[in-house]
Every structure is written in C-alpha cells, then in structure tokens.
Amino acid sequence: MVAKQIADLITLTRGLLVFIFPWLALAQGPESLPWAVALLAADWTGDSLDGPLARRSRLSIQTWIGDHDLEFDMAVAAGLLAYMFITGHVQATVALVYAGIWGAYFLRVGIPRPMGMLFQAPIYGWFIYVALMQAPGAGWWLVAWVLAAVVVTWPKFPKEVVPGFLNGMRETLGRE
C-alpha cells in the first residue's frame, strides 16, 4: 500500500466518527465523555498525519478523499456537535440554529477552506470547555494535545497556518 492510500484510509476512518460520536452518546450518555475525548484526540492525530503522509507519496495523483479532507473534518465536528446535543452539553436550539446557519451559508457559497475551519472551531472549543468542566483529566489531555501540536508545528503555525487562515478569511469575506 502506498502512502497516499494509507493517508486516504486514515481520513476515511476518521470520517466514521460522524456516526460513532452520536452512537457513543446514545449508548453511554454523558458518562462517555472521556471516550469522546480519546476519540477526538485520535481524530486530531490522524488529521495531523494524513496530509503529510499523502504529500510524501510517490504518486502525484489527487484522490476524491484527499480532495475532500476539509469536508471530512467538518463532518467529524458535526458528529461531535450531535454528541454534545445528545448528552445534554448543548441545547437543541443552539445546535440546530448553529448547524442551520452554517448549512445555509455553505449551500449558498460552497465551502471555502477558512470558513470550513471557522465552522469547526467553536464546536471544538465548546467540547474542550465541557471536557475541562465535566472530566478535567480528559479535558487537560485535549489542551495538552493542542499545545503539543502547536509546538511540533512551530514555526510553521505562526508563520504559515495563522496568516494563511487570516488571508483566506479576508479573501472569502471580500468575495461575498
């Protein structure tokens, strides 16, 4: 198996979380929070690995899965939002209004990368907050993961990732 195929398999496996998060909430309720934290950390780890792995591939082909990595990321975030709704960590009206506004936006303009990232950020931020409040040990693991990711990707994070996101936001908002 070549690197690109492994990267696609990682992405595809991560995509299953859109179904696993709600199932976990229904099966185990709020007590499943440490498991949800572990799954999210695994997702983030896979997301950190699949792109670099695909870029190392000797094959220069584009794949459908690779081309839709952002949509997989967004689906995982939506699954996590469903998890938080089902477990009572997000009110139904908040979850539905949030998903509805973003859904209408994406139907209207497509999915610009910065906006797809922006869609995910509040969901992940709220989940980290919930984890810190309800299962502090697990919550701090997520905080440590984020900090470790920034350190490992330093100096790329402040020199490329943040400016790339901000420039993308300016371009996207300037088009509308």
Image: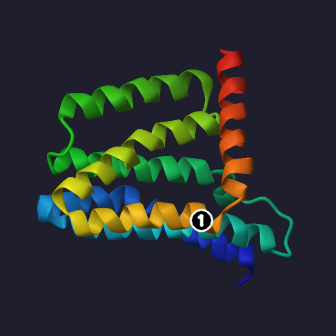
Position of residue 148 measured from the top left corner of the image (x, y, whole percent):
52, 67
Position of residue 47 measured from the top left corner of the image (x, y, whole percent):
56, 63
Secondary structure found at label 1: helix
Position of residue 46 measured from the top left corner of the image (x, y, whole percent):
54, 69
Q: Nearer the viewer, residue 21 or 32?
A: 32
- Give neighbour class at mark 1: few <14, some 14-19, many 20+ (Cα, 10 Å): few
Q: Is residue 54 visible?
A: yes
Left or right of 101 on screen, residue 111: right
Residue sitting at 18 percent across and 45 percent down? Answer: 89
Q: Is residue 40 visible?
A: no
Give the total number of marks visible in the rendering.
1
Residue sitting at 73 percent across and 25 percent down? Answer: 171
Residue sitting at 80 percent across and 74 percent down? Answer: 57
Left or right of 79 on screen, residue 170: right
Check disc 1 and report the residue beneath it. 151
Left or right of 68 on screen, residue 81: left
> Label 1 is placed on what type of residue?
Val
83, above or below 103, in the image: below
118, above or below 43, in the image: above
Q: Nearer the viewer, residue 92 or 142?
A: 142
Position of residue 95 measured from the top left corner of the image (x, y, whole percent):
28, 34
Tell me the quadrant of the picture where the C terminus can be found: top right
Residue sitting at 65 percent across and 29 percent down? Answer: 169
